[in-house]
Image (tube, rainbow, N blue to C red):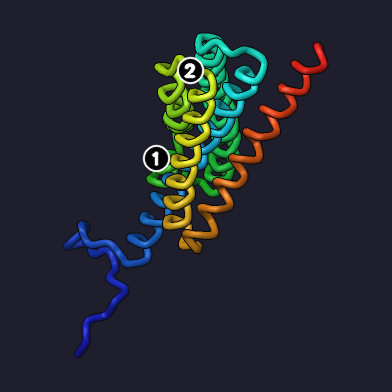
Amino acid sequence: MAPMNDTKVDAENPAVVSDDESTFDLAQRANWLRAAVLGANDGLVSTASLMLGVGAVKAEARAMVISGFAGLLAGACSMAIGEFVSVCSQRDVELAQLERDGKRGGEEEKGLPSPVQAAAASAMAFSVGAIVPLLAAGFIVNYRLRIAVVVAVASVALAAFGCIGAVLGRAAVARSSARVVIGGWAAMAVTFGLMRLFKASGI
């Protein structure tokens, strides 16, 4: 007789888990990884765009780096606070449901997401993405070269993030990566172009 695929937890062998639970756990990890990739992508695009916007009106490397670092700090704090509030709200709803079901204090409550861990992970993911253009621009004196390097490094990182997100989401890698890169280019171009116009108009 062929073995059954849906292995259940047994009182004599509690270490055995069902295939459904294993699949669910892998799906949860994939979702966390996708969220981390999206956070890093946000950090990369927003910081690179901010640095290019400042670079459009000020040629000094110091101004670009300081603006990028300020963007990293502000963005990481914003992401952390937003994630903390969101997960707290979600946790309150789920705790209220467990209270109604009489399941408070059980395994289901222990499995609820931690707001602090979610906030830390979100801030870390944003910071990882934001540090890329900062490192690219921090040691280049020549203005034109600095701008070109920030765009090039950001493009490569965006392509990598797009590929990772596509693999985790089981989507077409080339199309997903191209979409992420083009979106990043658009954000950087709009920011640089508008700030260039402000400089030209003397606003």
Q: Identify which residue, 121 or 137, lies in the foreground.
A: 137
Taking the spot 42% from the left edge, 30% from the top edge, the residue there is 128
Q: Toward which corner of the image does residue 197 lie, by quadrant?
A: top right
Q: Could you give the CA–CA distance between mark 1 and mark 2, rounded to whole angstroms?
A: 54 Å
Say which element carries label 2: loop
| Looking at the image, residue 60 lies above or below residue 115 | above
Q: Toward which corner of the image does residue 74 lie, by quadrant?
A: top right
Q: Identify which residue, 7 or 193, lies in the foreground.
A: 193
Q: Toward which corner of the image does residue 77 lie, by quadrant?
A: top right
| Residue 22: percent from left, percent from top | 33, 60
| Looking at the image, residue 134 lies above or below residue 95 | above
Circle on res. 142:
2
Circles 1 and 2, Cβ within 8 Å, touching? The answer is no
Q: Please tell me which of labels 1 and 2 falls first in the chain.
A: 1
Taking the spot 29% from the left edge, 76% from the top edge, the residue there is 5
| Looking at the image, residue 184 lies above or below residue 163 | above
57 relative position to 104: left or right: right
Q: Residue furthest bottom?
A: 1
In the image, what residue type sits under mark 2?
Answer: Asn
| Residue 169: percent from left, percent from top | 48, 57
Q: Count residues near mark 2 (Cα–Cα under 10 Å), then give few for <14, some for 14-19, many for 20+.
A: few
In the image, what residue type sits under mark 1?
Answer: Lys
Residue 130 makes an appearance in the image: yes
Q: Count residues near mark 1 (Cα–Cα under 10 Å), then give few for <14, some for 14-19, many for 20+.
A: few
| Looking at the image, residue 150 lies above or below residue 141 | below
* Residue where numbered disc 1 is placed: 110
10 relative position to 137: left or right: left
| Residue 42: percent from left, percent from top | 55, 35
Circle on res. 135:
none
Foreground tag (1 vs 2): 2
Taking the spot 23% from the left edge, 64% from the top edge, the residue there is 10
Say which element carries label 1: helix
